[in-house]
Image: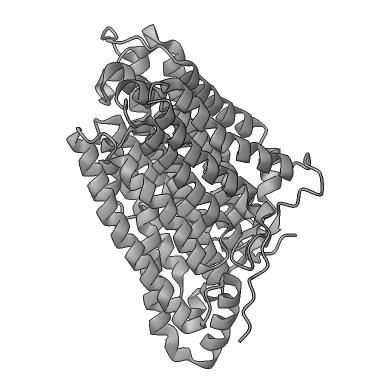
Amino acid sequence: MDFTLPQYDPFRMLPEIFMLLWALWVFTYDLITKRQKEAAVGYMALIGPAVPLLFIVFYLTGLLPESWRYGGSGFGAMFFNDTTAMFFKIVFLGAAIMAIGSSFGITKQKIVNHRGEFYGLLLFSTLGMMFLASSNELLTLYIGLELTTIPLFVLAAFFKDDKLSVEAGVKYFVIGAFSSALLLYGMSFLYGLSGTTGLVQMKMNMAVVFLSYRDIGVILLGGIVLLVAGVGFKLALPPFHQWAPDVYEGSPTPIAAFLSVGSKAAGLVAFGKIFVNGLMAFFGPEQAPNDWGMLVGLLAILAMVIGNVVAIRQTNIKRMLAYSSIAQAGYIMIGMVVLNEHGMASVAYYIFAYMFANMGAFAAVAIFEDQTGSCQIEDYKGLAKTSPVFAVSLSLFLLSLVGIPPLAGFLAKYKVFAAAISMATVDPSASWLYWLVGVGVLTAVFSLFYYANVMRLMFFSNEEPRHKITYSVPALCVLLLGLAGIVVFGIYAEPILKLVRTIPADFGLYIP
């Protein structure tokens, strides 16, 4: 029997290859300099995601020569660079840059002997996300997800002398391993029914099998439930959200930020590839019990209600942002269940806008924690008097998370709500989406309460402020980058909207 290697082109994996080599170099550089170059290691780590980010942006904007063939298949049918992959790689790399820029404070004060490992593991996690975005079949998708998650287990527990950090790492490891097992078990159901791990071929095979053997419904439903549970843990969707507040609170703040954006975006890519690309044929009440749309819609409602209501009671700002991220996952999933040309486009824009707002908010929290050692909301009282730039920046990030115009968060929420309404209008069987949007609008009003509470303490407290915030160059750059993102892409979003409009075609959805 003849054996032939699949057609491969390493050039299409050039950003991933660079990231791999650079992560190894960051490890090595910290060792050969005997861990004495604290700032140099951080600046060197920034090069890792910055170079691939520029490469992808230049490719998408046509600034690279046509001979630089980056789009298309890189290793048989397993690795494929389409618009979706490249767009989400921009989100992953942008989140990594902002996380590294926010880490200079903790690497100076708390991480003295393992800076190279800290930054290197962050780069390896980003590398896993990049491979996940380009995966085109179940096994490479799972491997990319594990390469994303395993470094984060270590990073969550990086403060080994801090009980909360160790607890965060252990909880994230146990729950992450359990969710990976559920995800892999669900994938085995799909492989058993379709006979393939390729997502596109799986969709076609499953449609044929379903038409021939209607009694596979129970087996398919079992696989869908396992997959929703597995990915639901990654996205922190209720009832799989219990780990998030404790892990966010105990993790180093830049890692909590990276978890809330990068890891969530990776979970969205995995969900979209499996359900929208691989199981889209099984969406709709006419094919019950194989309708995953209503199941995910119910989880989205739980996320919006639980996340926003419980966040009101929080006194620790990292726990508050953790519950906020649970609620944000609910808003994003509204767009995910909309299977028309607007659904995936709205999800892509939402996570892009969310990256700037949430990473910026966590960057501000990291700056405050580095200088005060506190994450208590009460300690933010009166900051507008001594640190007006800090107070205004944090307020703008929080207002974007609420969805206040003209910031990018407003357009993001508008897009997912409008996508759901457009589908419910033309498809009577999707009228339940009106209820989903209604819950989303009401809970967005609830969210204003706990976000505004932080702003109230900073601007209107009668107590004298206890602290004055100063900035390092990397931290200030992260704040300015976040502010630029929520303002510029809130007022002038057309370049990003033009790009995300091409994403539904990657999922076989109609584009007029």
Rendered image quadrant of residue 37: top left
Q: How many marks?
A: 0
Q: Nearer the viewer, residue 502 or 44?
A: 44
Residue located farthest toward the bottom when viewing the structure as drawn: 212
> Quick one: quadrant of the N terminus?
bottom right
Figure check: 136 above or below 97: below
For the C terminus, the image quarter is bottom right
Place of residue 466 in the rendered image (x, y in percent of width and height, measured from the top left): 27, 10
Residue 509 to residue 90: above or below? below
Judging depth in this view, the residue of 26 and 82 nearest the camera is 26
Outermost residue on the right side: it is: 66
Q: Residue at image x 26%, y 45%? A: 169
The residue at the far front in this view is 32
**In the rendered image, the vertical position of residue 461 relative to residue 24, given as above or below:** above
Q: Residue at x 67, y 33 (%)?
A: 492
Residue shown at 54% from the left, 63% from the top: 273
Whether residue 193 is visible, yes or no, is: yes
Residue 326 appears in the figure: no
397 left or right, relative to 511? left
Q: State the residue at coordinates (56%, 32%).
A: 47
Q: Position of residue 7 (x, y in %)?
A: 68, 67
List x then y, in percent, for residue 245: 28, 42
> Considering depth in this image, is 442 or 56 the residue closer to the camera?
56
Report whether 248 appears left or right of 77. Answer: left
According to the image, what is the colour scheme of the structure?
A: one colour
Relative to 43, does residue 222 appear above or below in the rendering?
below
Query: Could you say where residue 430 lies in the image, as x and y percent from the top left?
Result: 53, 66
Q: Toward which corner of the image does residue 225 lie, by quadrant? A: bottom left
